[in-house]
Amino acid sequence: MDSQTDDIPYLDLSAPDFSMRSEAVTAAREKSWYARTNYGIAILRYAEAAKLIRDPRLRQGSHAWPAHNDATGSFADWWLRIMLNREGADHQRLRRLAAPAFSPKIVKVLRPEFQALANELIDAFIDRGRCEFVSEFSEPYATRVICLLLDTPHQDWRHLVTLAADMGLALGTSYTQDQTQVNAATDQMVDYARGIVRRLRAGGLDDGFVSSLIRAHDENAAHLSEEEMIDTIVLSIFGGIDTTRSQVALAMDVFVQHPEQWALLGADPELARPAVEEVMRVRPTVTWVTRETLEELEFQELTIPAGTTVHMFSQAACSDPCAFETPGFDITVTDRKNHFGFGLGAHYCIGHFIARGDMTEALALLARRLRNPRLDGTPEYLRDSGNTGLLRLPIAFDA
């Protein structure tokens, strides 16, 4: 890779104190549109990230994450097989099979159930005037939404959220030391998915997502293998829980720091939809979107060799003052450029309609019922890189 590397910033993404929101990242963005890292190169500015994230000369880069971490085992094997990390015809085939379960039509049907679930959870702590937001709202809400989608017992949510959290450790920079825990959780999640299939086969197929996959497999196993069917179910559980629970908690954390914005949302529930987009712009749980070059390419006078990992730093790019005239958090601004929270291009998150829908309903109801939320203790955060989020968020509020 040629360039005057002495003039290009370097960021150590595995450093224990590294943060996507650090002054070091901001300073690097001011100096250059990209930085060198120990995981490839990082794209720091919006214009360059928006171009490269859709460039057909780059493939989905997350497939290389286990190799970057010298990680092996069941998660690494599953990670390489899933739709997210397939390319071309294989990716499109699996995407077509899964897409009907995540359509806008499904969101419309489930909207009343999202609202009922959110109200049920709020009812449990509203009279106390305080809660631990992660364990009492964002975790059960995100997980029970998945239970709704897969028609699995709601009482399984605690088991599923534990497995998803343990699997999610693989997406952080501590993957290497966590891989025993990650692999054990993956094995259990696969067993759970197999149990869903066995239950449906025994009790009769319905119109749901898993039944549609079973039918596709039974009609043509070459079109959808048994392993691909189970992998897709595991991905729908893991992906739906891990990112949504973290993003809802991060949203509350942001609003606690911006009480005037929370008051606006409480007064006007129509602001919930732009609020979701704004939170994902300024505080995304997915802090980078990864690509890998399929060939050597020239970009902005930089030669990038084939096989180079390229991280689009969502946090830095979507707060780039060159792209956002007023980059501060403001849910009333409705003409923002696209954020990268769901990716962009061929691998755009297949579950984005569901995620946007359930988060919109949650934020609208929370803002209406919980006034003046504020910290009621010390929050505990995951590392601010890879996939980030909160472990604890104790808040108090006026009911």
Image: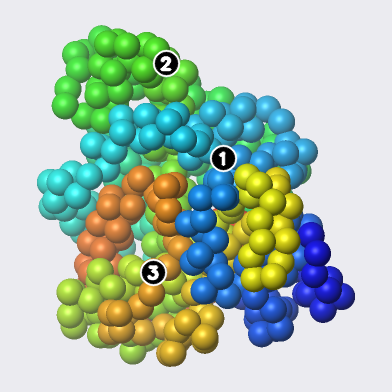
Residue that label 2 marks:
225
Q: Residues within 10 Å of mark 2 (few under 14, many from 20)?
A: some
Using the rendered image of the protein, determine whether residue 55 is visible from the camera's viewpoint: yes
Q: Where is residue 246 in the image (x, y as percent from the top left)?
A: 46, 58
Who's the residue at 39% across and 12% down the image? 222
Instruction: Tell whether 168 sits left or right of 214.
Output: right
Q: Earlier in the sequence, mark 2 or mark 1?
A: 1
Q: Which amino acid type corresponds to the residue marked 3 in the rendered image?
A: Asn
Q: How crowded is mark 1: few (under 14 residues within 10 Å), some or many (20 or more)?
A: many
Q: Which of marks 3 and 1 is in front?
A: 3
Label 2 vs label 1: CA separation?
23 Å
Q: Disc 3 on helix, strand or loop?
A: loop
Q: Position of residue 190 (x, y in %)?
A: 49, 24
Who's the residue at 44% across and 47% down the image? 347
Q: Which of 311 and 341 is in front in this view?
A: 311
Residue that label 3 marks:
338
Residue that label 1 marks:
167
**Which quarter shows the C terminus?**
bottom left
Q: Disc 2 on helix, strand or loop?
A: loop
Instruction: Tell whether 152 sits left or right of 18.
Output: left
**Which quarter shows the N terminus?**
bottom right
